[in-house]
């Protein structure tokens, strides 16, 4: 299980809505993310349970991508990784990896369910993310604030974005960045509702997972060879 304090648990339930009950989901919709996080959820969630359940969910996510990761992959970039539970688990299974995170450092007020054209939707706190990663054993990492920092300018072996890039906001927002961050072997893993579109953008597209029972009916893709 993950070590999670109350504040981080309140953040994680925004990033992984399946961690809360239908009643809490309704309250979040009524109050909006900020008030829900700062006032409502603090009395209604148990951080130990969240740490446990978040670990289970991230272990399942790890299983869906683990065959795409090899011991030769050393630089991992996470785009919109939330607090980074998946990356902690990857780090527990592989050696000498360096992790990079690009995230946003605020909690947007409204809950918008659709595509966020302006990409104003965010629910993270980079200080809490840093604490979570350290408390759960990740040592070799750097966090970049999408809105403030120069983004990393190195090449990556793997780029992972679960339920973030092309799920909440347009893939093209990151296209220029990806052109610089990918070499021909870089594996880009992300969830999308328009999988066919990406055969125009990458040389190779493999479907890792299909989410048939969800509203979005998305697919998890493993793409290599950015060609535009
Ligand atoms: C639904 S959560 C998913 C978090 C995590 N990937 C997971 O599977 O638990 C989406 C995440 O994307 C982040 N986000 C939103 N816009 C972003 C952007 N332009 N760049 C990086 N992260 C972003 C949000 O702050 C949030 O943590």
Image (spheres, rainbow, N blue to C red):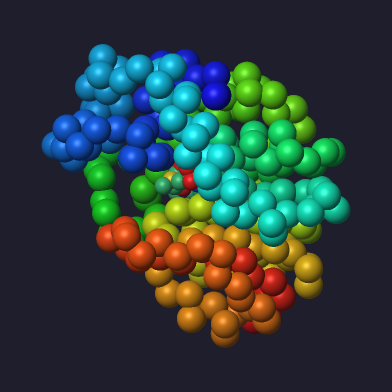
Q: Nearer the viewer, residue 145 or 5?
A: 5
Left or right of 62 on screen, residue 227: right
Question: Does 193 appear above or below 67?
Answer: below
Left or right of 93 on screen, residue 144: left
Image position, residue 31 (x, y; %): 17, 33
Q: Name the residue rendered at 85%, 53% in the picture.
A: 72
Question: Does 183 appear above or below 139?
Answer: below
Q: Is the C terminus in the top left, top right, bottom left or bottom right quadrant? A: bottom right
Q: Name the residue rendered at 54%, 78% in the picture.
A: 198
Q: Is the N terminus in the top left, top right, bottom left or bottom right quadrant? A: top right
Left or right of 188 on screen, residue 95: right
Image position, residue 109 (x, y; %): 27, 38
Residue 56 appears in view: yes
Q: Nearer the viewer, residue 209 or 186?
A: 209
Image position, residue 3 (x, y; %): 55, 19
Question: Does 154 appear above or below 135?
Answer: below
Q: Name the residue rendered at 51%, 52% in the picture.
A: 162
Question: Does 78 appear above or below 224?
Answer: above
């Amino acid at each position: 299980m993950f070590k999670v304090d109350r504040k981080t648990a309140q953040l994680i339930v925004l990033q992984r809505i399946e961690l809360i009950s239908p009643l809490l989901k309704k309250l979040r919709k009524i109050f909006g993310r900020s008030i829900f996080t700062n006032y409502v959820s603090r009395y209604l969630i148990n951080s130990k349970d969240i740490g446990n359940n978040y670990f289970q969910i991230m272990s399942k996510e790890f299983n869906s991508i683990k065959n795409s990761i090899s011991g030769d992959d050393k630089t991992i970039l996470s785009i919109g990784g939330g607090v980074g539970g998946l990356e902690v688990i990857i780090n527990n299974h592989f050696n000498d990896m360096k992790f990079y995170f690009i995230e946003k450092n605020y909690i947007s007020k409204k809950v918008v369910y659709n595509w966020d054209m302006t990409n104003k939707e965010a629910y993270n706190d980079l200080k809490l993310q840093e604490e979570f990663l350290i408390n759960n054993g990740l040592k070799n990492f750097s966090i970049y604030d999408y809105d403030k920092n120069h983004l990393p300018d190195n090449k990556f072996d793997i780029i992972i974005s679960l339920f973030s890039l092309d799920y909440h906001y347009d893939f093209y927002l990151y296209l220029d960045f990806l052109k610089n961050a990918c070499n021909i072997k870089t594996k880009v893993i992300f969830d999308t509702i328009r999988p066919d579109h990406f055969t125009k953008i990458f040389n190779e597209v493999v479907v890792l997972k299909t989410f048939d029972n969800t509203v979005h009916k998305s697919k998890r893709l493993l793409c290599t060879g950015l060609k535009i």
